[in-house]
């Protein structure tokens, strides 16, 4: 096994849009950060006029209903962080300061692809410190009725096995398995969009959710068909998006995971619960600096992109 360094952005990356639940406009800037900084949100624009730093860690999760929220709603929080967290984890970004002037990250097109594009435009650089991984040593599980998620030992990069099963015939039962590597994330996961059901819209609006949802940022599903004129990006886009969400939620472990994730009808709440189960006993995990042999490596991806630019 070889060691690999931590990575951060080479320059700031700015993204603007609206929140899918709040409907409010928001501007976000992903800043480079030093080694061992981790991913931290800088919440600005608060009524108090005092900015707040929020570590992107599972201990700071405040809510998991329809999205993942970190921070405190009274003193400052950031909602719908999962797509950005997935992009950072999927591309191997260890350190970043994410400045955001609203209560929710922009939904953009409903996937992680616009975040990936912004990070790619900014570029990545290595930090002068080795990357540390969190290795799962003992299996843990969280369940609610028939739904469950599990984390178990696995020799290699994070392996994700996600299955969904909806009574809606348009979605039905779908399953997707992959290992989390930058090339796989870009090709198979990043472009999968969030989705919702037409018959849930009025209920969600009354509850204060989905106020910014539209066909531009959400795959809308009726009882008979996908409503969006362009259709789906993948035949199994629904399960791919659930896999994307899982990558983002698991990134709240604070380190890249070495283990196997299995989910059946999972979601944000169970993803958070399985992290709580993992961290409930120090014997469940260990922190290691060795990278898995089969990891594609961010350094290789950065070098490949640089070579492509020099040849193009």
Image (tube, helix red, strand yellow):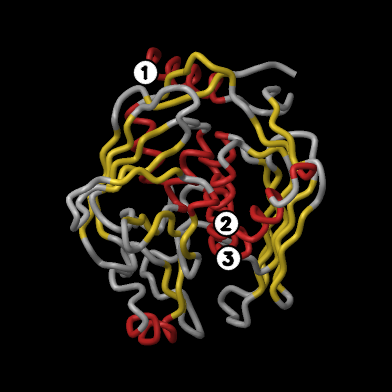
Indicate which label's residue lies in the foreground, 2 or 3.
3
The crowd level at tag 2 (other Cα within 10 Å; few <14, some 14-19, many 20+) is many
Image position, residue 23 (x, y; %): 25, 67
The one nearer the camera, 164 or 187, is 164
Mark 1 or mark 3, earlier in chain: 3
Indicate which label's residue lies in the foreground, 1 or 2.
2
The crowd level at tag 1 (other Cα within 10 Å; few <14, some 14-19, many 20+) is few
Query: Residue at position x 38%, y 64% from top?
Result: 230
How far apart are labels 1 and 2 at the CA level?
31 Å
Can you tell which quarter of the image residue 73 is in?
bottom left
Q: Which mark is residue 269?
A: 3
Label 1 SS: loop
Left or right of residue 89: residue 26? left
The one nearer the camera, 161 or 85, is 85
What residue is shown with label 2?
A: 240
How far apart are labels 1 and 3 at the CA level?
45 Å
Image position, residue 3 (x, y; %): 66, 17
Q: Which mark is residue 312?
A: 1
Mark 2 or mark 3, earlier in chain: 2
Mark 1 or mark 2, earlier in chain: 2
Image position, residue 69 (x, y; %): 43, 59
Quadrant that contains the N terminus:
top right
Q: Are marks 1 and 3 in contact (CB under 8 Å)?
A: no
Up-down: is 85 above or below 108? above
Up-down: is 87 above or below 215? above
Can you tell which quarter of the image residue 215 is in?
bottom left
Label 2 SS: helix
């Amino acid at each position: 096994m070889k060691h690999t360094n931590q990575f951060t952005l080479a320059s700031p990356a700015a993204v603007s849009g609206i929140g899918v639940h709040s409907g409010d406009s928001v501007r976000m800037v992903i800043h480079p950060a030093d080694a061992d900084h981790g991913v931290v949100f800088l919440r600005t624009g608060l009524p108090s006029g005092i900015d707040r730093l929020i570590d992107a860690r599972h201990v700071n999760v405040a809510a998991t209903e329809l999205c993942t929220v970190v921070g405190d709603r009274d003193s400052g929080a950031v909602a719908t962080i999962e797509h950005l967290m997935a992009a950072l984890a999927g591309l191997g970004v260890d350190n970043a300061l994410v400045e955001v002037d609203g209560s929710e990250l922009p939904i953009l097109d409903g996937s992680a692809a616009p975040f990936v594009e912004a990070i790619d435009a900014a570029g990545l650089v290595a930090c002068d410190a080795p990357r540390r991984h969190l290795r799962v040593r003992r299996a843990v599980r969280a369940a609610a009725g028939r739904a469950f998620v599990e984390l178990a030992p696995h020799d290699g990069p994070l392996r994700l096995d996600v299955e969904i099963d909806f009574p809606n015939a348009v979605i039905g039962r779908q399953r997707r398995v992959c290992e989390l590597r930058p090339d796989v994330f870009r090709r198979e996961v990043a472009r999968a969009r969030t989705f919702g059901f037409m018959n849930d819209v009025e209920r969600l609006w009354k509850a204060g959710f989905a106020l910014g949802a539209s066909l531009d940022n959400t795959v809308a599903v009726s009882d008979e068909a996908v409503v969006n004129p362009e259709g789906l990006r993948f035949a199994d886009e629904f399960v791919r998006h659930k896999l994307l969400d899982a990558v983002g939620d698991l990134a709240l472990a604070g380190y890249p995971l070495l283990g196997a994730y299995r989910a059946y009808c999972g979601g944000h709440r169970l993803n958070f619960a399985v992290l709580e189960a993992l961290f409930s006993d120090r014997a469940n995990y260990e922190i290691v600096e060795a990278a898995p042999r089969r990891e594609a490596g961010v350094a290789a991806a950065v070098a490949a992109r640089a070579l492509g630019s020099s040849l193009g």
